[in-house]
């Protein structure tokens, strides 16, 4: 076996697809069921690079048809509104297409190609990363599974086992935990506005997003440990309305929620992203708060670099790109960490004193008056090259 991929989230499924198309022998081991993975409502905004990667992987057809191209977003604070015109400032837009749809498209392509994906694997272990062959074991359908392989791709998310397989003394972790979370609601109602609205309010941040022209996704800032069961639909809609500009709130169409959950906000980076035969990709190596919509895009950027490095290794016999993998990815990761952190502290209610709150007001005011500042936001939001 050439590569064992642990995790069938967006990173693992995409990497598997890129390797299979390059004729590299691989399997994917996933703890959850396929239905569970496809039902996880998470990301919704794709950078241009992610759209290109999906297209290159042969899974861009439905995305091209159903994805919504957005040329800007709106910011709202203290009765003021500002549209950031991505198209005018960068020549690019972003595409709204749900993570649920991406995992479904990737799974369908894998099924048609006869890829080996073992869902509902228990007890995945990763060993011998410094030896002549790595070893990955698991339990699947009551039987043991075992693979000796050249490389392991750790695409098993923040709570996975692969990062822990790097000895603590060789791994450095950088983290910032915010005292807040996002309470998210999905509803089959038309979106309140044609573009996303990021709203700063003294009661806390709110975001109006969407999955399609008939399905909305809304978030409100809550305490990190908030229990979603404490929020019936009426309470959620009331709170959202209070945090939006009046005319937006007046146009809000409410309806029964299809999903409701709380996601805590965290910034996290583990370095290096490689240890011997193990390569970490996506949330296994780094987490960003969702404010900048960067998590899935970073995961795709990682696996795009990793797939090209594996191709170079097997087609040309060179390990140079594999050796450069961690540094190449971390350069992008830290810029996305910086942007996600900045956009979070701009838009959320985090300040612990009046000085912090005044700085936040000043920053919005500066942004509103400075095309240069708007360009910085736009460039980062649509995705750095
Ligand atoms: P995932 O999706 O967590 O997948 C990891 C997979 O590994 C499996 N696994 C294991 N398998 C085998 N053995 C084990 N021991 C295992 N442990 C775990 C898991 O079951 C899972 O299937 O990581 P991946 O592939 O790196 O993908 C990352 C993205 O899912 C994540 O970054 C995004 O969802 C973040 N995110 C957003 N990203 C964007 O780019 N744009 C957005 O608009 C956006 N919005 C969001 C988001 C994340 C959110 N939440 C809930 C954290 C909005 C929210 C609310
Ligand atoms: C979403 O639609 O889920 C979404 C959109 C933008 C973000 C985060 C999440 O910044």
Image (tube, helix red, strand yellow):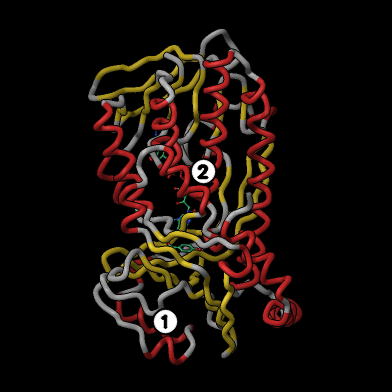
Helix, strand or loop under label 1: helix
Residue matched to label 1: 239
Give the image location of residue 51, x and y in percent.
Answer: 45, 49
Specify whether 58 is left or right of 383.
Answer: left
Which of the two labelled residues, at mark 1 and mark 2, occupies the earlier sequence position?
A: 1
Residue at 67% x, 81% y is: 368
Give the image location of residue 71, x and y in percent.
Answer: 50, 68
Q: Is residue 33 visible?
A: no
Residue at 67% x, 64% y is: 342
Q: Residues within 10 Å of mark 2 (few under 14, many from 20)?
A: many
Specify whether 206 is left or right of 144.
Answer: right
Give the image location of residue 336, x and y in percent.
Answer: 63, 53
Q: In this rendered view, identify the residue nearer to me: 72 or 200.
A: 72
From mark 1 to mark 2, how far is it between C-alphas? 32 Å
Q: Is mark 1 within 8 Å of ligand 1?
A: no
Q: In this rendered view, identify the residue nearer to me: 94 or 256.
A: 94
Q: Is mark 2 within 8 Å of ligand 1?
A: yes
Task: Using the image, determine if residue 20 lies above or below residue 252.
Answer: above
Residue at 42% x, 62% y is: 262
Residue matched to label 2: 299
Task: Using the image, determine if residue 96 lies above or below residue 361.
Answer: above
């Amino acid at each position: 076996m050439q590569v064992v991929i642990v995790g069938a989230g967006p990173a693992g499924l995409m990497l598997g697809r890129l390797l299979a198309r390059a004729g590299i022998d691989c399997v994917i081991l996933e703890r959850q069921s396929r239905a569970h993975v496809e039902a996880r409502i998470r990301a919704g905004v794709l950078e241009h690079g992610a759209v290109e990667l999906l297209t290159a992987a042969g899974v861009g057809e439905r995305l091209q048809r159903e994805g919504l191209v957005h040329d800007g977003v709106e910011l709202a604070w203290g009765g003021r509104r500002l549209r950031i015109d991505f198209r005018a400032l960068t020549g690019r837009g972003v595409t709204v297409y749900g993570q649920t749809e991406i995992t479904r498209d990737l799974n369908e392509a894998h099924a048609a190609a006869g890829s080996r994906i073992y869902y509902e694997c228990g007890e995945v272990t990763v060993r011998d990363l410094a030896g002549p062959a790595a070893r990955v074991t698991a339990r699947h359908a009551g039987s043991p599974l075992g693979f000796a392989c050249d490389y392991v791709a750790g695409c098993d998310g923040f709570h996975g086992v692969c990062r822990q397989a790097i000895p603590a003394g060789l791994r450095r972790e950088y983290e910032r935990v915010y005292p807040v979370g996002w309470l998210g609601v999905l509803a089959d109602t038309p979106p309140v506005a044609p573009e996303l609205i990021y709203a700063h309010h003294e009661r806390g941040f709110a975001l109006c997003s969407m999955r399609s022209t008939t399905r909305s996704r809304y978030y409100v800032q809550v305490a990190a440990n908030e229990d979603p069961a404490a929020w019936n639909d009426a309470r959620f809609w009331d709170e959202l309305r209070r945090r939006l500009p009046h005319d937006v709130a007046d146009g809000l169409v409410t309806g029964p929620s299809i999903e409701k959950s709380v996601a805590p906000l965290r910034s996290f980076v583990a370095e290096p992203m490689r240890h011997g035969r193990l390569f970490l990709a996506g949330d296994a190596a780094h987490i960003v708060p969702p404010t900048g919509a960067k998590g899935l895009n970073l995961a795709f950027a990682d696996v795009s670099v990793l797939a090209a490095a594996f191709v170079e290794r097997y087609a040309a016999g060179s390990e140079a790109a594999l050796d450069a993998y961690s540094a190449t990815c971390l350069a992008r990761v830290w810029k996305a960490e910086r942007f996600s952190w900045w956009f979070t502290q701009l838009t959320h209610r985090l300040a612990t004193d009046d000085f912090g709150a005044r700085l936040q007001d000043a920053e919005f005011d500066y942004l509103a008056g400075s095309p240069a500042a708007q360009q910085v936001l736009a460039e980062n939001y649509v995705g750095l090259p």
